[in-house]
Amino acid sequence: MQIGQLATRAHVSVDTVRYYERNGILPPPQRKESGYRAYGNDDVARLHFLRRAKALGFTLKEIRELLVLSSSRADDMAELKTAAQEKLADVQHKLDELTRIRDGLQTLVSSCPGHGALNHCPILAALSENPS
């Protein structure tokens, strides 16, 4: 199949396919005598893998590592599980941080009456405080 067909089957753009090729995430395709790229079902599967991994928050660097680990199907799955556990811990840390930010903003918003002079605004006062 050609690049447009690959992109359609993998639900990505042609530019995305080229980007992954340039960055070594998608191996260089075979070329037909005409010079057109020739892709196979393995390329579609790899792009689906990439999309799912990105949807779970893996970076391209991490996806490269997952692909290396997954290429040795006979190996033990411990390294792959460790990589997923590390990503889960990272996501949990980000959620904790976002929760802290949300709670702080909720406190500021609920303390502000929303009317009156700015020099009496509790939000401005809290943001202007010097940290101890």
Image (tube, grey):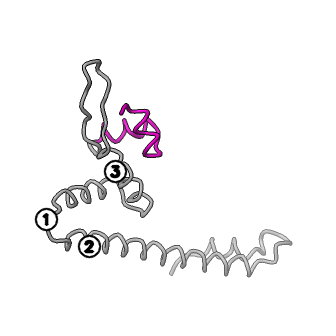
Q: Which residue is drawn at 13% across and 67% down?
A: 75
Q: In this view, does 80 lie above or below 22?
A: below
For discs 2 and 1, the disc positioned in front in the rendered view: 1
For discs 3 and 2, the disc positioned in front in the rendered view: 3
In the image: residue 15, left or right of residue 80: right
Mark 3 vs 1: CB contact within 8 A: no
* Cα gap from disc 3 to disc 2, whole angstroms: 21 Å
* Residue pointed to by mark 3: 45
Q: The residue under label 1 is which amino acid type? A: Ala
Q: Point out residue 80 in the picture as x, y percentages from the top left corner.
A: 24, 68
Pick whichever of labels 3 and 1 is earlier in the sequence: 3
In the image: residue 50, left or right of residue 30: right
Q: Residue at x 20, y 71 (%)?
A: 77
In the image: residue 131, left or right of residue 44: right
Residue in front for this viewpoint, 15 or 6: 6
Q: Residue at x 78, y 75 (%)?
A: 120
* Residue pointed to by mark 2: 81
* Residue pointed to by mark 1: 74
Is label 1 in a helix, a strand or a loop? loop
Q: Point out residue 55 in the picture as x, y percentages from the top left corner.
A: 45, 60
Q: The residue under label 3 is which amino acid type? A: Ala
- Quadrant position of residue 2: top left
Classed neighbour count for the residue bearing mark 2: other residues with Cα under 10 Å, few (<14), some (14–19), many (≥20): few
Is label 2 in a helix, a strand or a loop? helix
Q: The residue under label 2 is which amino acid type? A: Lys
Q: Point out residue 62 in the picture as x, y percentages from the top left corner.
A: 30, 58
Pick whichever of labels 3 and 2 is earlier in the sequence: 3
Residue 42 lies in magenta, yes or no?
no
